Image (cartoon, coloured by chain):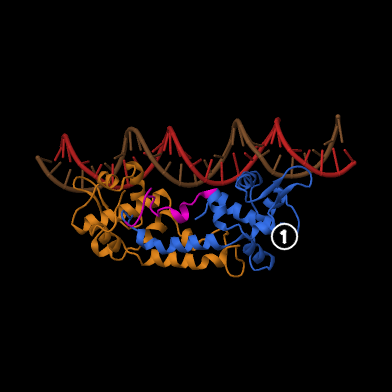
Chain colours: A blue, B orange, C brown, D red
Amino acid sequence: MFSKACEYAIKAAIFITSSSEEGERVSLIQIAKEIDSPEAYTAKVLQKLTKNNIVNSIKGPSGGFEIKPKSANKIKLSQIVTAIDGDSIYNGCALGFGKCNDQKPCPVHFQFIGIRNDLKALLQTTTLKTLSQDIHNGITFLKQ
Amino acid sequence: MFSKACEYAIKAAIFITSSSEEGERVSLIQIAKEIDSPEAYTAKVLQKLTKNNIVNSIKGPSGGFEIKPKSANKIKLSQIVTAIDGDSIYNGCALGFGKCNDQKPCPVHFQFIGIRNDLKALLQTTTLKTLSQDIHNGITFLKQ
DNA sequence: ATTATTTCGGACATTTTTGTCCTTTATTAA
DNA sequence: TTAATAAAGGACAAAAATGTCCGAAATAAT
């Protein structure tokens, strides 16, 4: 479904949001530990999120990553997914057609319309804040 | 969503089904041409489908691939997907947890339950016959 | 100013996926 | 029996994804 890079991005963004809500910046090392991911690779992913203005990065001592609570309320899962994997999961064709539509549909086009729309809606409505609250309330977890 | 190999597998299986319905075996060359895929790579994919008893292969002159109409009515998309990609698309966790369940859920577990179930149902109910009929009726297409 | 800290970013390594080539094996037909 | 045909399968090649290493740049504290 998602690439490894995207999985790390989602988890990292949720963790950063959680910490930022408590006024704490977090370092790469903390993030990688918390989401159980390879450090250097996670750094690359975070750089992409930074360039896409999803997370804020601060260099130097007492630096780290943060996502302002105000911002976390607006950031949707779709923004993270698009930044890392592109939009092909919910906009692309299930069988790889460059252009797949009602006029020239792939063999599973009509079957997948519903699922693709549901997935799109899910990603475009779920915010980082929501996901971060679930973590905070002990309803969900960042690692096994 | 699906790997390239799986995309080829699905398209190839549909084309073989269509041809078999008209009593015609098809060769690797015909398949690759019809679904617009690399020949040698498609051969590997077809070998997997053969080993999984999804398609029937016959060597030698007037050989080729076939799927008996009786069989096409029973073969579900899920069987093809599982044979090539495994079942992680509809059974696995969206964020890669080895075990992700209501007791120890990943951050997006509850959001994805519906989509995963819908996808599972779709794959487990859609048959090759159905997809082949849509091609035959000019409703869908195997290539752009 | 110097030092310590932390992200940035380039280069490289490994693994997986995708794709190719060529020989072997089975089968049919002449 | 021989030749032609078509899939099977091993070996290799290329590309993409994943992962690692290390020096550069920025920043804060001393």
Can I make out residue B78 in this image?
Answer: no
Point 26% across, 57% down: residue: B135
Q: Is residue A25 left or right of residue B16?
A: right
Location of the N terminus of chain B by quadrant is bottom left
Asked whether residue A18 appears in the rendered view, the answer is yes
Q: Position of residue B94 (x, y in %)?
A: 54, 59
**Left or right: D10 in relation to B100:** left
* Residue D1 x/y as whole percent: 15, 37
Q: According to the image, label 1 marks what residue?
A: A21
10 Å crowding of disc 1: few (<14), some (14-19), many (20+): some
- Would you identify the image quadrant in which residue D21 lies? top right
Residue A87 place in picture, x, y as percent: 49, 52
Image quarter of residue A17: bottom right
Dot 1: what SS? helix
Identify which residue, A117 or B6, lies in the foreground: A117
Left or right: residue B89 versus residue B62 is right
Is A93 magenta? The answer is yes
Q: Is residue B137 magenta?
A: no
Looking at the image, residue B117 lies above or below residue B66: below
Magenta region, residue range: A84-102
* Chain letter behind tag 1: A
Amino acid tagged 1: Glu
Q: Nearer the viewer, residue D27 or B125?
A: D27
Q: Where does the image place residue A140, in percent across and percent down from the top left?
A: 63, 65
Q: Main secondary structure of the magenta part?
A: loop
* Nearest the eye: C19 or A52: A52
Residue at figure coordinates x 32%, y 42% from the top left: B39
Q: How many marks?
A: 1
- Describe residue A39's horizontal placement relative to residue A78 as left or right: right
Q: Residue at x 69, y 52 (%)?
A: A31
